[in-house]
Amino acid sequence: MLRAVDPSNGKLIREVPEADPGAVDAALDAAVSAFHAWREQPFSERAELLNAVAAYMREERERLALLMTEEMGKPIREARGEVDKAAWCAEHYAAHAADYLATQSLPSDATRSYVQHLPLGPVLGILPWNAPFWLAFRFCAPALMAGNTGLLKHDPHVPGCAAAIAECFSAVGAPEGLLTNLPLGNAAVEGVIRDSRVRAVSFTGSERAGGIVAGIAASEIKPVVLELGGSDPAIVLADADLAAAADTLTLSRIINAGQSCIAAKRIIVEAPVYEQMCTLLHERFAALRLGDPRDESTQVGPIARPDLRDNLARQVRETVDAGARVLLGGDVVDGPGYYYPVTLLADVEPGMTAFREETFGPVGVLIRAEDDEHALALANDTPYGLAAGVWTAAVRGEALARRIEAGQVAVNGIVKTDPRLPSGGIKRSGIGRELGPHGIHEFVNAQQVWVGPARPA
């Protein structure tokens, strides 16, 4: 049984039975059957369906947003924005998939030679709870526009969101099997990955689980895209616009109560402006409103589960015990729900828990750097490589970006995902890319075609 618990009060709100083996088998058959017809549809007809799904989501924004708020605690204003962003992703690929997958002519000894991009078949998306709609569409919009079909195995804690995503497709007349929700616990996933009807896998989640999924997919010789954790650095140098940096880094750190892979988790500040940055961030963090995610004025909601809050509390406690300075928060809030206070730690150093581990919650971590070279070394001192930020003069920031070990870098702006731009990590933060033209190329057959006769040498 899949159980959804409201993290704002700890109450059970939904129970959904897991799909039995017969239902899974039927879903896989339907995905294969739909694929044979869908792959033959022109881009224009695929786009028409995706645009209809996007329009339906915008019409149902309030209902869909509330599902996220009640199942994983996303503040309602952020939840509405996530619905719109997911719809935008569908619209973006509807508009650009044909260009992204255009046939590429390559000269050779052939009369004509080219590469065409063909769909693979049913693609399995294994998704986490922290951005239920956005991450689903980041997976399915490019996969479907490429001519594949999708199987959605969402996190067991957001079964209502998962069902609603599939319903967005059925409501606009999508063919049965085009996008299917598989309500499964994590133990049942391996069998689906190994099934010969599944041709590729997309996974977003923890480093540990990603390694397991990658191992299973590799043993079956199936392509896989992994978007895993991050301990993202944000470098603030002495010539930066400190007020702008403080505003943006505060927002980055507290979106979704800090439960974001690409949030600014380690704020590395050059020594001459370190104390000033501590003050600016303290002012902004202290002004944030923690509360009921249904309240329009709430800026920071609860942590999604009690075990996640307990782990965050451990990370803060161990970091403080190792010598970090508490500027704000740091103690678990009493009362119902899984709230953790907005927290700001200063003087964090390599070796401390909050430096080494990914912190998934509203915890800002300040680290002093002697100069730009030291800041760069601190930024790269992590097994992760998802995203990073740099605050300095633009030309200097671009030069530093080339030396940062991360899949994406924002110079003087917020690190974010955008349908127009590729996103993904290196090192232990993942394999492959999502979004942009790169993302839609992950799940296609780049088929080389050589047409004779051969041309004279």
Image: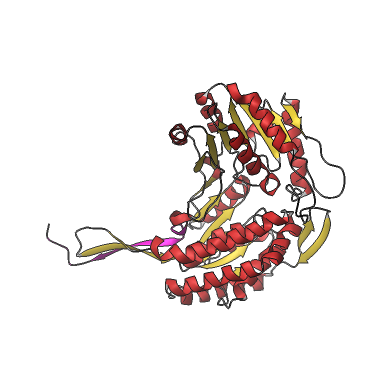
Measuring from the top left, give residue 351's x and y in whole percent. 64, 27
> Which residue, as the protein is rendered here, is positioned at the far right?
335
Between residue 389 and residue 434, name the one nearer to us: 389
Does 304 sit above or below residue 67? Answer: above
Q: What residue appears at the point 83 percent right and 41 percent down from the top-left corner?
A: 333
Measuring from the top left, give residue 383's x and y in whole percent. 56, 36
State the quadrant of the C terminus: bottom left
Does 398 sit above or below residue 425? Answer: above
Between residue 357 and residue 452, name the one nearer to us: 357
Q: What residue appears at the point 62 percent right and 25 percent down from the top-left corner?
A: 274
Q: Quadrant of residue 177?
A: bottom right
Q: Quadrant of residue 276?
A: top right
Residue 445 covered by magenta stretch: yes
Q: What residue appears at the point 59 percent right and 32 percent down from the top-left corner?
A: 242
Residue range (magenta): 440-457
Q: Relative to residue 224, is residue 360 drawn left or right?
A: right
Does 139 sit above or below residue 384? Answer: below
Residue 319 appears in the picture as rendered:
yes
Residue 441 covered by magenta stretch: yes
Does 322 sit above or below residue 358? Answer: above
Q: Relative to residue 6, is residue 141 drawn left or right?
A: left
Measuring from the top left, give residue 37's x and y in whole percent. 47, 77
